[in-house]
Amino acid sequence: MKHLLTSLLFGALALQLPAQAKEIQVGSLKIEHGYAMETRPGQPNGGAFIEVENRGKRVERLLSVSFPKTVSERGELHTMKHENGKMIMREVPKFEIPAGGKLKLQPGGDHLMIIGIKEPLKPGSTVKATLQFENAGKVDVDLSVKARSEIKPHGHDESHHGGHGSKKH
Ligand SMILES: [Cu+2]
């Protein structure tokens, strides 16, 4: 059983490798794990995520994100805030990455927002994005599109219809 599980895991890793976004080094920045969430037909906006490590000695700031016109109208930097007991998204002017620190965008937290999506983002495809940093300037990255099931296997946000005996433990 354990052996089977291990080979399944390795199989999955091997399959994922070609689609994995590459790690990018720009000056003292290391950018990796870039991906975008798949979107449904008609869905106007979508989320995207990256990690940026700042190995430099001064603070870096991510000022904006943009996408090719064929992908979306524009991009925004978003954070999540509690307001009146609800989690809501808010646009912010920048994300700071302290010297020696790391910016980790992820679902439920700070994220890139793809606004005005032209064609649904399909799992397995790639979206190009341009990040504008204060010091490092413009950096192009490839975001691999991931299926929702890959990102949130338990579907916490949309689980109202999912109560059919999913509790196994
Ligand atoms: Cu958002």
Image (cartoon, rainbow, N blue to C red):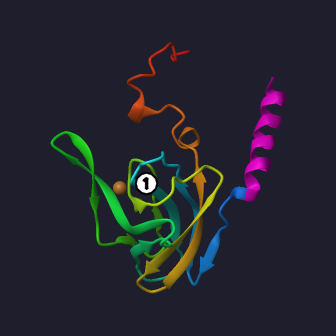
Q: Nearer the viewer, residue 71 or 163?
A: 71
- Check the image and report above or below for 101 versus 18: below
- Check the image and report above or below for 100 versus 108: below
Position of 27 with respect to 104 (left or right) is right
Q: Quadrant of the C terminus?
A: top right
Q: Position of residue 4 (x, y in %)?
A: 83, 28
Element under disc 1: strand
Residue at (43% x, 83% y) in the render: 58
Q: Position of residue 46 (x, y in %)?
A: 43, 54
Q: Nearer the viewer, residue 69 or 154?
A: 69
Q: Dot 1: few (<14), some (14–19), or many (≥20) neighbours within 10 Å?
A: many
Q: Which residues are magenta?
A: 1-18
Q: Quadrant of the N terminus?
A: top right
Please tell me in which quadrant of the rendered image residue 5 appears: top right
- Check the image and report above or below for 124 versus 133: above
- Residue bearing the label numbered 1: 46
Residue at (83% x, 36% y) in the render: 7
- Check the image and report above or below for 64 versus 110: below
Residue situated furthest left in the rendering? 84
Q: Position of residue 161 (x, y in %)?
A: 41, 22
- Name the amino acid type tagged 1: Gly
Predominant secondary structure, magenta span: helix
Whether residue 113 can be seen here: no
Whether residue 46 can be seen here: yes
Q: Is residue 14 magenta?
A: yes
Q: Position of residue 104 (x, y in %)?
A: 47, 60
Q: Nearer the viewer, residue 13 or 69?
A: 69
Q: Total of numbered circles in the picture?
A: 1
Image region (quadrant) for ligand 1: bottom left
Q: Is residue 143 magenta?
A: no
Q: Nearer the viewer, residue 12 or 6?
A: 12
